[in-house]
Image: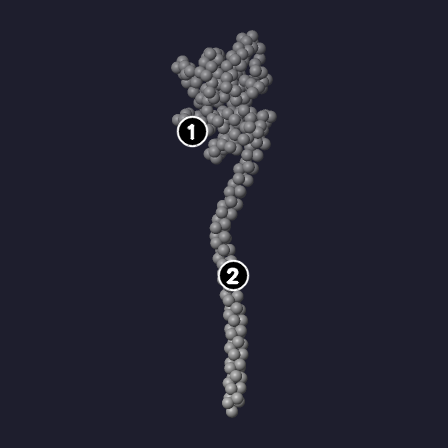
Amino acid sequence: KLRRRERRRERCERGRARAERSGRGGREKDGGQHRRARESRERDSRDRGDSRSRGDSRGPRERGNRRGRGRNNNNEAEFESFRERYPMDQRAYAALTGAPPEVQSVVLSRFKPRSEGDDDYSALVMTFVRAVMNRREHGPRPPGPPVNRREHGRGQEEYNHEEKPAAKRDHDPQDGEDDDESTPLGSFRLRYPMDDRAFSALQQASSAVQDVVISDFKPRREGEDDYSALVMSFVRAVQTRVGAGRPVSRGGGARNRD
């Protein structure tokens, strides 16, 4: 009886042990599955959060960059159109594209040379860009009266926003209103800087001579610092033609060679 009782106890203990092992294995298996599912859900949640955060942070920048690229493309198109209309070398083009935006806007909208269709506007563009930048740094001039253009065949296109280049001269009170850039002579001196001697010779010339000089003076190069000698020579040549009674050209003169 004792042996049978012990055998039954041993069988019961082995059965309980098998049951415990089986239950433990099932719980471990279920726990592993639950753990893997939970980790997968956490990874998905992190991925979605990262995607949203990346979208929030990149979206405005990318939209801003796209808008910026659109503006740059528009500016480049304007620059290329301007360069096609007024051919210039790389140095002048770099000065224009490297200028502040407000200077670029003034140059693109208000650059009006005396003649269209020339082969090279590099010196004029450089001078105009520097003039607008100087005006921006030192403040605008007080507004003057409208420019009075002389009635002649070709007329003169004025540089409404161009500063006077640094020609070496002192203001002479005797110059009077003719030295004002709002007059034809003043505008001519603004475009072609000259000393007081050359400007006085032009002032003292007759109206007919002044008209011809303003209309026909076309130096080989624009944008130089001093045209005094060229202006003096041209004034004397026109005076000689007028004095000799020979016909003078107005609006179609040949270029003056320096």
Q: Nearer the viewer, residue 118 or 135?
A: 135
Q: Residue 57 bears which disc, if any?
A: none
Q: Quadrant of the C terminus?
A: top right
Distance between the alpha carbons at the discs numbered 2 and 1: 58 Å
Q: Is residue 110 left or right of residue 142?
A: right
Q: Nearer the viewer, mark 2 or mark 1?
A: 2
Q: Is residue 83 left or right of residue 103?
A: right
Residue 5: x and y, percent? Answer: 51, 88
- Which type of secondary structure does the marked residue at label 1 adopt? helix
Residue at the far bottom in the pictured view: 1
Q: In terms of image quadrants, where is residue 242?
A: top right
Q: Nearer the viewer, residue 11 or 136?
A: 11
Kindly identify the residue that appears in the image at 47 percent across and 21 percent down. 165
Image: 239 above or below 68: above
Residue 98: x and y, percent? Answer: 51, 32
Q: Is residue 227 visible?
A: yes
Pointer 1 residue? 137
Name the amino acid type tagged 1: Glu
Mark 2 touches mark 1? (CB < 8 Å): no
Kindly identify the residue that appears in the image at 51 percent across and 61 percent down. 44
| Mark 2 nearby-residue class (10 Å; few <14, some 14–19, many ≥20) | few
Q: Is residue 108 visible?
A: no
Kindly identify the residue that appears in the image at 54 percent across and 31 percent down. 94
Q: Nearer the viewer, residue 141 or 248?
A: 141
Q: In terms of image quadrants, where is residue 115?
A: top right
Kindly identify the residue that appears in the image at 48 percent across and 18 percent down. 193
Name the amino acid type tagged 2: Asp
Residue at the far top in the pictured view: 244
Residue 92: x and y, percent? Answer: 54, 28
Pointer 2 residue? 44
